[in-house]
Image (cartoon, grey):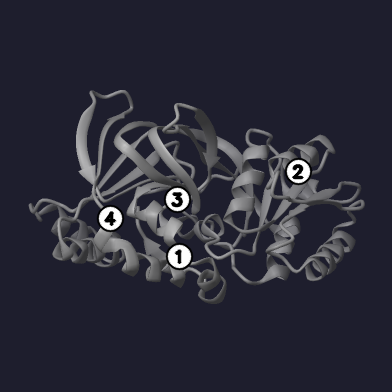
Amino acid sequence: MSPDQTSSGAHVAVIFNPVKVDIDELRAEVALAEEEAGWNATLWLETSVDDPGQGMAKEAIASGASVVLAAGGDGTVRAVAEGMMNSGVPLVLLPAGTGNLLARNLGITLNRLPEAVQLAVTGEDRAIDMGTALLRRPDGSTEQHTFVVMVGIGLDAKMIAATNPELKKRVGWLAYVEAIARIARDVDAVKLSYSLDGSPTRSTSVHTLLIGNCGALPGNVLIMPEAKIDDGLLDVAAMRPRNLWGWVRVGTAVVWENGVLRKSRAGRRLMAADKRVRVLRYFQGRRADLRFEKPEEFEIDGEEMGLVTTLSVRVEPASLVVRVPRDVSPERAGISSAPAPE
């Protein structure tokens, strides 16, 4: 569906988290876009603790909405995306949280609500991948969740669980840095067995394991440099430092290698010539099956999810249509050059 189809006679739906957004400002901006595009009356749907967005997304689609606007943080975006999975209806992100990870990875400007709302009128549709995580709890129960950015085990998940919510409100994603500094020395390595795309099971230990659909974190930290959000693959980053020097090497790999060397042919040759045991390794695949030696903390799109004993993650190719700025290059947005089919 092209933006031209979201025009006169159509209607849009806005799903908003009342804790994260200024509803009066949001209503005013949507009213301006509604008048400009000649839409019918907008459908307004408010999330709740019991339903953070999945049910609202399905209601919006059932109402015949031509496009859905999601206003909130990463949790709201993930929930709405889950409800819209494989619907073909475009999703517009109105980022209002701390991380805004999907918006960052798609090149959507943060903290500019008028521009974000205008994407419903002027943006371009792209089909992107999602991920599905099937997990088992220590009590034997199972759950399934979708994600649009990444899931994490180890220090990453423990960091999110340890982050001070009041500090996060005041300083945003920098609160994660404080949490890492506080807990890093006490985090044990995660021991696990794994299989990638049905390969023979292997055992390893890591301090952090990320399985992602996108590659960039807050602060423009490129944690998975080869990740593309529409390539039909999951990217895996395994961090295995043994001491403080190992963490320094991880930081060097993320900042210097990912941010500088990988961008040139000469830099990639230099990396290939480095034969040291790497403390940060990358893999790609369509499915990863993990079993942990003991229950481990788990996070999904920056949300603490408790303890798990097994985890099966698979990619869901081209399962979500998002509307992105037309003037953002595919390289910056981490997507291919092809727009979504109409």
Q: Quadrant of the C terminus?
A: top right
Q: Residues within 10 Å of mark 2 (few under 14, many from 20)?
A: many
Mark toward the start of the polypeptide (4 vs 3): 4
Measured as percent of width and height from the top left, residue 227 is found at: 39, 48
| Mark-to-mark CA distance, 1 and 2 | 28 Å
Callout 1, which amino acid?
Answer: Pro
| Displayed quadrant of residue 89 | top right
What's the residue type where badge 2 is placed? Met
The spot of residue 302 in percent (x, y) is 49, 54
**Amino acid type, mark 4:** Val
In the image, residue 318 sits, relative to residue 249, either above or below, namely above
Mark number for residue 218? Answer: 1
Separation of residues labelled 2 and 3 (CA atoms): 25 Å
Q: Nearer the viewer, residue 212 or 151?
A: 151
The secondary element bearing badge 2 is classed as helix
Residue 268 visible in the picture: yes
The residue that label 2 is drawn on is 56
Q: What amino acid does circle 3 point to?
A: Cys
Callout 3 environment at 10 Å: few (<14), some (14 to 19), or many (20+)? many
Is residue 336 at all visible to an observer of this figure?
no
Disc 1: CA contacts within 10 A as few (<14), some (14-19) or many (>=20): some
The answer to whether residue 15 is left or right of residue 172 is right
Residue at 90 percent of width and 62 percent of height: 35
Q: Quadrant of the N terminus?
A: top right
Mark sitting earlier along the chain (2/4): 2
Residue depicted at 38% across the width and 54% down the height: 158
Residue underneath mark 3:
214
- Front of the two marks 4 and 3: 4
Give the image location of residue 90, x and y in percent: 69, 45
In terms of sequence position, does the residue under pointer 2 or pointer 3 come before the other?
Answer: 2
Tell me what residue is drawn at x 22 percent, y 66 percent.
252
Which residue position is annotated with label 4? 187
